[in-house]
Image (cartoon, rainbow, N blue to C red):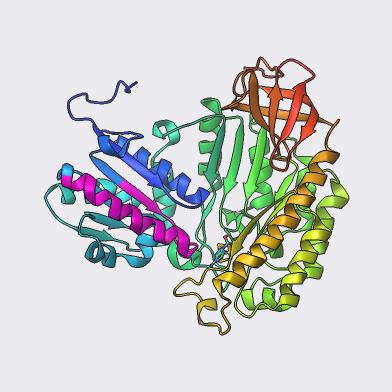
Amino acid sequence: MKEPSQNEDTAKKVHIQTFGCQMNEYDADKMLAVLRHENYFHTNYQEDADLIILNTCSIREKAENRVFSELGRLRKLKSVNPELKIGVGGCVAQQEGESILLREANVDFVFGTDNLFELPEMLNKVSQGQKISQTERHPRQKIRNFIPNYTFQQARHFGIKAHLTITKGCNNHCSFCVVPITRGPEVSREPEDILAEAQQLISVGTKEICLLGQNVNSYKANGVDFVELLHRLDKLENLERLRFISPHPKDFHAVLADAFVTLPSLCEHLHLPLQSGSDRILRGMRRWYTMETFYEKVALLRDRLPEATLSTDLIVGFPGETEEEFEMTMEAVRSVCFDLIYSFKYSSRPGTRAAEYPEHLSENEKSERLRTLLETQEEIVQKKNEALVGSIQEVLIEGKHHRKENTATGRTRGNHPVSIINSATKVGDLLAVRITGAQPNSLEAEPISTSTDSG
Ligand code: 5AD
Ligand code: SF4
């Protein structure tokens, strides 16, 4: 259904296709918010669209290649509908800029990660037949001012879960990572703006907010640090669950571990990206912690909250990684027993330090290591999930199971996906359940109480 403010005669349709990380999902919401002011509404179908935006990711080469093959596919659509405008935003656009216009004649405009608020001006020029490449970086203050100008009121979806960006960019310069190049230095949003946005999300039914940033725990603005921000958000009425991704292990301290115990809304789940189990590789990655300190950080959390879940990111086949060093990553995985790992084959990114390192491994070696890692992790998770059978968990209902009748799906506070059988629930309900079964990727449960939902 269209919104009343939309002008029926001039409304246009935009299709935004997002690749990559949560940060990009968030940017897509912002783009839509901006475009709503220009009388665009979203369509799920490329064929219907007057404007298609590819919101790109360059963190690994695979994601980048997908963008160019998608642009190739779009040639056909443009030949059928020459009025169609095509834009490329996000990290690939930030890095490649004008060369995308040269490589793909169908692309009308390219814009960087700081430039999405300039979409109206760009579209105006594009409608006059100009080709635009706008990837200029803005000073920090200007970005700070941009962010709150558009609210989530016009955003694509505000379900019961929302992502809220608190920092953009990164100052860390891990040697493998393109983010500091594509997203620039770290900027923290004003706490007042974050709280106002959170309040607004809650007022439209959001129950769970996940704070986003490349390195959330280095957040600092107006004298407010990350833990203080968590405290302030926790006080907001009707916010049931608070999460954050991703903290950097070097900045994970006892005060933050304490917050998991003292703040009722903060879910008992920590994503702590390890990347490698070898101190030598961690040095080469410029991660600034050792395995010893990583284990200490894990203990900080587990001493306080033994039931907390832990997830991590791991890279296999970093340049020069020996069999023994890969085995150290395996050892770390076996001893920490993460509940979930996101594992990646090292992907060489232009402009990063590690791209210049010698001894790059072959694709086959990297694939073999990834396979070994995933096999071991699957066994660990199966055991950990089986140990949860019989336990009572709180689940936030997110929807209906797409295959199973009469079954709802949701997540525990530890972030386990759960299907709840024979459950008459609605989205947004908080439900106490008993875990009855365990698969490697999900849990099964039955309700043990009626909804605790207040609204
Ligand atoms: N190659 C492989 N994985 C990478 N990541 C970031 N850059 C690369 C790269 N060049 C992974 C890291 C990071 C996650 C978001 O993506 O594990 O934590
Ligand atoms: Fe990239 Fe490292 Fe910054 Fe994460 S902390 S975004 S891996 S540079």
Residue extending farthest to the bottom is 358
State the image coordinates of residue 192 (x, y, percent, origin top left): 53, 43
Q: Is residue 200 above or below residue 186?
A: above
Q: Quarter for ligand 1?
A: bottom right
Among the 4 quarters of the image, the one containing residue 218: bottom right
| Position of the C terminus by quadrant | top right
What residue is drawn where x is 55% and y is 70%?
363
State the image coordinates of residue 302 (x, y, percent, origin top left): 84, 51
What residue is drawn where x is 75% and y is 57%?
376
Depth check, front residue: 323 or 90? 323
* Res 138 visible: no
State the image coordinates of residue 29 (x, y, percent, origin top left): 42, 41
Depth check, front residue: 398 or 323? 323
Residue extending farthest to the left is 128
Q: Is residue 120 magenta?
A: no
Among the 4 quarters of the image, the one containing residue 32: top left
* Res 206 visible: yes
Among the 4 quarters of the image, the one containing residue 385: top right
What span is colored magenta in the figure? 53-79
Depth check, front residue: 143 or 83? 83
State the image coordinates of residue 100 (x, y, percent, origin top left): 28, 63
Q: Main secondary structure of the magenta part?
A: helix
